[in-house]
Amino acid sequence: MAFLLIYDVYMCEERMKEICPSAKLILKCVLADCQLVFRRFYETAALTLEQGEYKVPAILWQLSKEELQDMKIVYPKEIYHQIDIYLKMKDENITVNIFVMKETPIVYPKEKELDLIEEAYGEHNFDYSCVENALDMAKDMEGENGTLYE
């Protein structure tokens, strides 16, 4: 058994179950002192989690260790770090995996990515303001880092 903390489009149960059929939603939570950032992911943009002054909604999934390996296809090691964090749940401490993007340029996402994020946030009735903050940051950086639309 493995635990995976997700803050991006894979908060959507249907999308997660395509890759990890046994995935079980364990916990909806909010991560303090974090912020979301849109960074270049090949020819698109993806959300990543960074230290910041905001709160970011997240989902804790329980899945098999084999399925955790499958998530490395979604979060390739040349772009993502896999980090272990420790979380106290009831009377036990569990190891939770989280994928965070390495530093790539901040870019504004395409409409398709925004639609997927909106779907994931809407499914759980999460506050969307952290995504709006990430969009504002990406818009401000467009002149410096270019755009995905060039």
Image (spheres, helix red, strand yellow):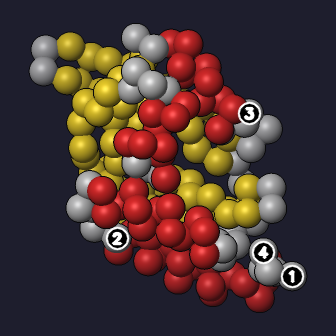
Q: CA distance from mark 3 to mark 1?
A: 26 Å
**First reached walking from the N terminus: tag 3 or tag 4:** 3
**First reached walking from the N terminus: tag 2 or tag 3:** 3
Which numbered tag is attached to residue 77?
3
Residue picked out by circle 2 = 128
Question: Is 129 placed left or right of 93 in the picture?
Answer: right
Which numbered tag is attached to residue 150?
1
Q: Are marks 1 and 2 in contact (CB under 8 Å)?
A: no
Tell me the SS state at disc 3.
Answer: loop
Quadrant (top left, top right, bottom left, bottom right) of the C terminus: bottom right
Q: Residue at x 41, y 36 (%)?
A: 5
Q: Are marks 3 and 4 in contact (CB under 8 Å)?
A: no
Q: What amino acid is found at the position of numbered circle 1 in the picture? A: Glu
The front one of 113 and 91 is 113
Tell me the SS state at disc 2.
Answer: loop
Label 4 CA crowd tier, 10 Å (few <14, some 14–19, many 20+):
some
